[in-house]
């Protein structure tokens, strides 16, 4: 196609100028994102890599075979998978309920929104400390509530069997605000005429929810599932307030990112850290492709 | 029937809201209790005596004022620098025409998939090599280019009609003038949203300060709080006072700018 005269002229005028606008952004991106990304890929294939001197003995799959035979990494994959498989569906169902309530025309909706959304903007370390306090064996609130139902106290944070459940409960609470916001946005995109038509036809509220709301909300629900799966796969920071920076009370609660951090920061085994980072990246990449697919093909509004 | 339904909705909303917000209430209430009252069964839901001394203790035993100041400096600088790079890049990606524009943009957007955790290994070496280890600068520099915000702002700039641009150009405005005199004022709501999301993420940042700082003088609040927990042992009334110091600014920010924040988050969550 022949370019229009105005376009050709525009190109001429601007030649050279775009770089000046892009430079500040590109410099930061290249130094702190692109280069470290490629370098992590490279390090994961270097044998006996020394971070500071840059020395290494050869290329190979050594780091990958080592992490996949490392019980801690396997433990991390397993815990992360369990965490995702419980936190994501449970927080989605609860958020769906909360979003359908918040979507009603009620008074004081600002106050309600603040109450529901505030966990999203507050530091995980700070709110993690409150949860640590509520999970406390002797004086924690959760055990106090359990006693109402005649249940025995649970040693959430010091009995390794209950470490993951504690992390999951904290995670569900923490993931809900974002999920509710995304679902609310989905609700508001549903054309109100569907409801008018349904009411004219005398449909029951239950049928309206399952026949109209849920199908129309399906793309948004799919989107929140993927977004939450990605963010839950990176569970890590929560371990710091709850378990004093250890992976659970018996070192049995590794997660993928905790393993990465441990290999890098504590053990200084860079090859293994980089290899686990690449595994994390591949997981995120696959999930992101699914997310893009949903956004492209399912958006019906 | 209708009133019954409405009462049910309010009841459920209130119960849900209480559960979601309860940890913050509990944080604050516990921070005002005495050590003896914190460790009593059954727990009290209102302190018998308001112990503001817990806050005094937190401020005197750990340099929370320094942490607070560091957090403000880091958030302030990283938000302003990010805004600058974002505005310039979004303008180039949306308005200027140059070879490879769409390729550079798509490649940048593709990099959004890379988790920050993957970058810490090399970024750590980089800041050590350029001699910035344990400085506030190293907490700011890696975060000045945000693909996510550039993407949002570019989309906003795209929605501005071409005719405005061409009439400004005809009137003799340069690109630079057009950007700062017309585009930026028009984009104020989008810019506010981006700045707020960025401020929240930056304020709560924990992993990078944990790795890139090692002295008390350079800590920001979340890491300072974690260090306070490790150093001063588990005294919940004091820990809750310190945690309150960390969360209150963000709660205030949220209450003041709820609409902008919710609107921004609904476009793809909180990202750096």
Image: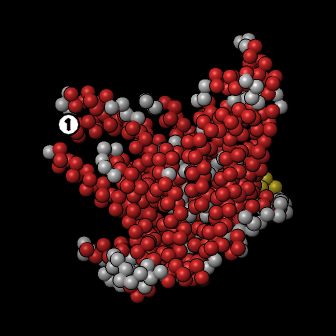
> What number of labels is visible?
1
Image quadrant containing the C terminus of chain A: top left
Q: Position of residue A129 (x, y in %)?
A: 49, 71
- The subunit letter for the residue under badge 1 reads A
Quadrant of the rendered image containing residue B116: bottom right
Q: Residue furthest bottom?
A: B36
Helix, strand or loop at label 1? It is: loop
Q: Identify the residue shown where x is 20% and y is 27%.
A: A201
Count neighbours of disc 1 (C-alpha within 10 A) and say few if under 14, some if 14 to 19, many if 20 or more.
Answer: few
Is residue B130 or residue A231 the one in the foreground?
A: B130
Is residue B41 or residue B115 the one in the foreground?
A: B41
Q: Identify the residue shown where x is 57% and y is 51%.
A: B196
Instruction: Give left or right: position of A136 versus B129.
Output: left
Q: Residue furthest top?
A: A2
Instruction: Give left or right: position of A87 versus B4.
Output: right
Quadrant of the rendered image containing residue B221: bottom right
Evaluate whether residue A4 shows in this view: yes
Q: Is residue B143 above or below residue B40?
A: above
Image quadrant containing the N terminus of chain A: top right
Q: Identify the residue shown where x is 60% and y is 60%.
A: B203
Q: Position of residue B61 (x, y in %)?
A: 60, 83
Instruction: Give left or right: position of B81 versus A224.
Output: right
Q: Identify the residue shown where x is 65% and y is 38%.
A: B184
User: Mark 1 = which residue?
Assistant: A204
Q: Is residue A175 above or below residue B176?
A: below
Q: Position of residue A77 (x, y in %)?
A: 54, 58
Is residue A125 or residue A74 the one in the foreground?
A: A125
Q: Position of residue A269 (x, y in %)?
A: 72, 65
Q: Is residue B214 above or below residue A20?
A: below
Quadrant of the rendered image containing residue B124: bottom right
Instruction: Give left or right: position of B158 versus A115.
Output: right
């Amino acid at each position: 196609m022949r370019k229009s005269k105005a376009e050709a002229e525009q190109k001429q005028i601007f030649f050279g100028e775009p770089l000046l606008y892009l430079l500040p952004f590109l410099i930061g991106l290249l130094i702190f994102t692109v280069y470290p990304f490629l370098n992590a890929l490279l390090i994961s294939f270097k044998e006996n890599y020394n971070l500071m001197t840059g020395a290494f003995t050869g290329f190979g799959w050594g780091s990958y075979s080592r992490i996949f035979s490392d019980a801690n990494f396997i433990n991390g994959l397993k815990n992360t998978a369990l965490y995702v498989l419980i936190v994501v569906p449970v927080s989605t169902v609860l958020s769906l309920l909360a979003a359908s309530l918040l979507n009603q025309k009620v008074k004081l909706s600002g106050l309600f929104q603040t109450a529901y959304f505030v966990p999203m903007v507050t530091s995980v370390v700070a709110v993690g400390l409150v949860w640590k306090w509520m999970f406390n064996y002797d004086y924690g609130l959760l055990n106090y509530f359990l006693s109402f139902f005649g249940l025995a106290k649970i040693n959430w944070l010091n009995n390794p069997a209950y470490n993951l459940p504690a992390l999951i409960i904290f995670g569900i609470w923490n993931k809900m605000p974002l999920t509710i916001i995304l679902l609310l946005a989905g609700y508001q995109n549903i054309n109100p005429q569907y409801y008018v038509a349904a009411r004219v036809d005398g449909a029951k509220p239950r049928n309206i929810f399952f026949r109209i709301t849920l199908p129309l909300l399906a793309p948004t629900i799919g989107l929140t599932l993927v977004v939450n799966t990605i963010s839950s796969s990176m569970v890590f920071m929560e371990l710091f307030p709850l378990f004093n920076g250890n992976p659970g009370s018996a070192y049995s609660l590794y997660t993928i990112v905790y393993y990465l951090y441990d290999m890098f920061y504590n053990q200084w085994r860079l090859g293994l850290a980089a290899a686990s980072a690449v595994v994390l990246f591949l997981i995120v990449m696959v999930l992101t492709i699914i997310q893009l697919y949903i956004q492209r093909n399912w958006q019906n509004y | 029937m209708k009133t019954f339904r409405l009462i049910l909705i309010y009841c459920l909303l209130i119960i849900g809201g209480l559960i979601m917000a309860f940890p913050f209430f509990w944080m604050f209430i516990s921070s005002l209790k005495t050590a003896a009252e914190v460790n009593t069964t059954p727990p009290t839901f209102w302190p018998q005596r308001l112990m503001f001394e817990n806050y005094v203790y937190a401020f005197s035993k750990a340099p929370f004022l320094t942490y607070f100041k560091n957090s403000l400096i880091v958030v302030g600088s990283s938000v302003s620098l990010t805004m600058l790079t974002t505005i310039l890049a979004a303008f180039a990606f949306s308005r200027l025409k140059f070879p490879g524009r769409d390729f550079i943009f798509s490649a940048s957007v593709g990099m959004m998939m890379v988790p920050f955790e993957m970058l810490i290994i090399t970024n750590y070496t980089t800041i050590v090599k350029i001699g910035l280890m344990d400085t506030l600068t190293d907490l700011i520099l890696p975060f000045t280019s945000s693909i996510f915000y550039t993407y949002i702002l570019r989309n906003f700039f795209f929605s501005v009609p071409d005719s405005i641009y061409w009439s400004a150009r005809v009137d003799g405005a340069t690109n630079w003038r057009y950007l700062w005199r017309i585009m930026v004022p028009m984009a104020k709501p989008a810019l506010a949203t981006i700045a707020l999301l960025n401020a929240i993420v930056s304020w709560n940042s924990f992993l990078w300060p944990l790795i890139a700082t090692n002295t008390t003088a350079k800590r920001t609040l979340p890491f300072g709080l974690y260090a306070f927990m490790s150093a001063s042992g588990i005294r919940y009334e004091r820990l809750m006072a310190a945690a309150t110091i960390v969360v209150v600014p963000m709660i205030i920010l949220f209450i003041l700018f709820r609409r902008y924040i919710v609107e921004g988050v609904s476009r793809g969550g909180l990202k750096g």
